Image: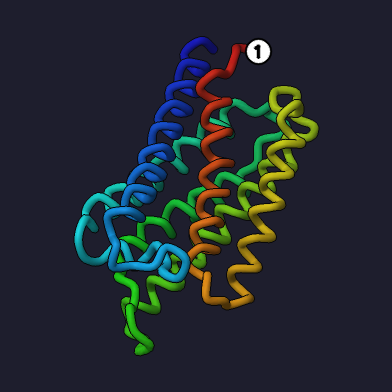
Amino acid sequence: MHGKHTLIRWLGRLALAGVSFYFLVAAVLQFLRTDYSFLGTPLSFYLLGPYNGWLHAAFYVLAAAIVSLALATYLSSAAQWRSITTLVLFMLGAIGVVVTAVAATDTNARLTVHGAIHLAAAALAFSATSFGMLLQSWQFRRDPVWRHHFRPAMELAVFEFLVLWFYALIHTRVNGFMEKLTIVLILIWLGQQAGRLARLRRH
């Protein structure tokens, strides 16, 4: 049991480091890429052009962080409240993050094959991770290990889900900002859960 607890905490630390690295790189690029509009340009565009290597690395690190967090949360939960569905959703989200980085987005109105793959992968990353956050938060309500974190986790997951669908269904001039806000909310949820895992006490 001691070895399992140590593994959970280390996975939590790795997830927290990965989420922090992604946030830092994405935030710094908002200042370095003065050719892009913060409000109007999606983060995917920053995967092309100057400093794109840093963001590619950040996407891969984030995918690893999601996997680490999903495994650690699964292992730390009470046996009867572990969910393979939640684990699979987070894994699919991580795959979507990787493919989003690999397949370049289209920067004009003409849809290409790699652009279509990018859009599908981004949709998978957003939706699978968001549903994973919702389901995991809901499971916290009766899990003796996590029940005291149910309310803050659930409230943030629901808010992020609403923002995601607003971004997906309503197109405005600040669509880039709405996408980045959605990403930030996901990162906050992931970062908070990773922090809890990193500080988890043995039960």
Q: Is residue 202 left or right of residue 80?
A: left
Q: Position of residue 83 (x, y in %)?
A: 65, 41
In which quadrant is the C terminus drawn?
A: top right
Q: Is residue 130 left or right of residue 60?
A: right
In the depicted structure, whether residue 124 falls above or below residue 8:
below
- Local SS, label 1: loop
Quadrant of the rendered image containing residue 47: bottom left
Q: How many marks?
A: 1
Quadrant of the rendered image containing residue 15: top left
Q: Which residue is disc 1 drawn over?
A: 203
| Residue drawn at (35%, 77%) of the image | 115
In the depicted structure, whether residue 169 falls above or below residue 148:
below
Name the colour scheme: rainbow
- Residue that extends furthest to the bottom in the rendered view of this protein: 110
Q: Position of residue 17 (x, y in %)?
A: 39, 32
Q: Amino acid at mark 1?
A: His
